[in-house]
Amino acid sequence: MSSTNGHSPKRAILYARVSTDEQARSGYSLAQQMEALRAYAAHEGYEVLEEIADPGQSGASLERPGMDRVRDLVATGGVSVVLAQDRDRFAREPAYHYLLRREFEEHGTKIRALNDRGDDSPEGKLTDGILDQPAKFERAKTAERSRRGKLRKAREGKIVAGHTPNYGFRFNSARDGYEVDEGTMPVVRHIFQMVGGGGESVYGVVRGLERLGISGPRGGRWNKTQVRRVILGDVYKPHTFKEIRGLVTPEVAARLNPEKNYGIWWFNRRRVKVTQVSEPSDNGKRYRRRSELETKDQSEWIAVPVPDAGVPREVVDAARVAIKDNRRSSNAGRRFWQLSGGVMRCGACGNAMSPQTSVRKSGHMYFYYYCHRGASSGQHNCTSSKCIQAEQIERTVWNFTHELLTKPEQLQDDLERMIELEREGVRGNPEREAKAWLNKLAETDRERRGYQRLAANGHMTHEELDEALAELEETRTTAKRELEALAGQRERLEQLEQEKDALLENYAALAPEALESLDPEERHRIYKMLRLRVIAGLDGGVEVNGAFGGALSVCELEPSSSSSRPWR
């Protein structure tokens, strides 16, 4: 392993990161960061092993493609230092600096930023840690200012404009209010009349809009969820001035016409937390954003009056009563779809394909899988326009799986290989990482007691104590979250082991005739255990991959029947 003692070459990795927001807000570019890092490395006599960039990646997590590459290279040895322009390029949370520093030290690698103030001594590390806090505090302050600004705007009776307005409305010139869009609002009124006045079902509304050739809110075809969202949207329900006055400030109420009705656009109803996670894939690893949606207490909602949509109150109420007992159901309804839940995927965009039932005039029902992105003309549209007949593809996939289960020795080897791949995909040393986070928790507890003693002896003000304790609590939250993620990794591996044993004991041992009698739910369960992916190609062909035939083999199947969408 190389070192920095002057007898071996000093090898460096250059790392740059920029989030999408930073690019848009300040033009903080990867090129500028790399230029500064190259100049520093040349001045200090470093041999640059690799330049690694993370474009459009947040520093709120270590789950980033570029950072994974950095950690892999450090783990192989021979890296003297990992360089970044600023400390927050590695991570915004100081707790993640702590983890990276500990991990890199195990391989003789240092972590350096061009804006470091301290050295490798405990005092130097403390200095850098202290200097991290103002930047962290400024980011928190900026986010809080933005949040408070939006709340203030909503309390003033103004729309906080998003990407697109509610269907049937358009933004005003200032983008802080709604105007009725007479090009699309008649469709909204038609939906309410069909359900509230004509007794039509939600599915019947979808079919009726398709027959009329009316595009949905996102440019594609309508679906039941969008129709329900219109019927339940308070933005379309007329409210009297008296009702509105009880929900808004006196200043907002004073600007309204007491003789008119208004809809309500709600702000601050939900809290969305977005995190980036990585998971094993056919090509090693894939990254996806995971959103957690939480509805806030109604006392936190802010009502913003908008123009009346022109739907009579009694029609709105009748429509809501008509769908009150209708559960939001999947397209499955009449049958169990064996390849649902992400098993069947579009070969063009990789998206999970959706089930679709088509009822002809004769009353005969047809079942298909289709890519809903291919049905949309929005920004996430897909080039696929094919539907895969459900019965035939499900039979084809089951015949293939049936053959796998009749070869238990080969299946066991494949399942064990899949588990080994999962272990190899785990970043770093989980046990050592968990120990580091536990140490960090213990350290924050000691610091908390120390701050409290300082405050008790009059060496800190109450405001300083509150700020210090808030920072410690954020670090504790990060450490606990990472410990939970590590526990989740362990649980996934344990689940894979359990599923392997279940497959081998419960299914691979069955006679062929017993396998054939398994119901659709049991077959679906086997597909999930095998991590099966059925990929529908643009040419109508289908391929299957999963935990069989070696690492991640692919089996070409006979093309299934496919067609253009039957509802078009």
Image (cartoon, rainbow, N blue to C red):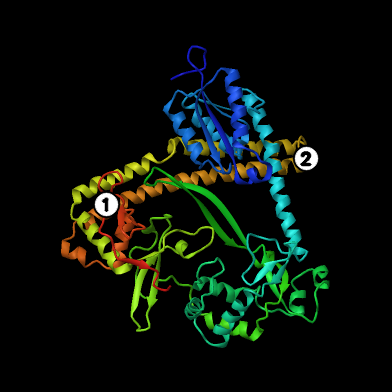
- Give the residue type at disc 1: Cys
Q: Position of residue 497 (x, y in %)?
A: 31, 49
Give the labeled residue for mark 2.
461
Placement of 411 over or under 241, stated as above or below: above
The reply, left or right, for residue 75 in relation to residue 439 is left
Query: Closest to the observer: 308 or 411?
Result: 308
In which quadrant of the rendered image does the C terminus lie?
A: bottom left
> Which quadrant of the structure image shows residue 471?
top right
Residue matched to label 1: 555
Which quadrant of the view contains residue 310? bottom right
Which one is in front, 32 or 145? Answer: 32
Say whether residue 150 is left or right of residue 61. right
Q: Which tag is nearer the camera, tag 2 or tag 1?
A: 1
> What x and y, as percent, mark residue 85?
62, 31
- Which amino acid type is marked by label 2? Thr
Q: Quadrant of the N terminus?
A: top left
Q: Residue furthest top?
A: 7
Q: Which type of secondary structure does the marked residue at label 1 adopt?
A: strand
Q: Is residue 287 above or below residue 168?
A: above
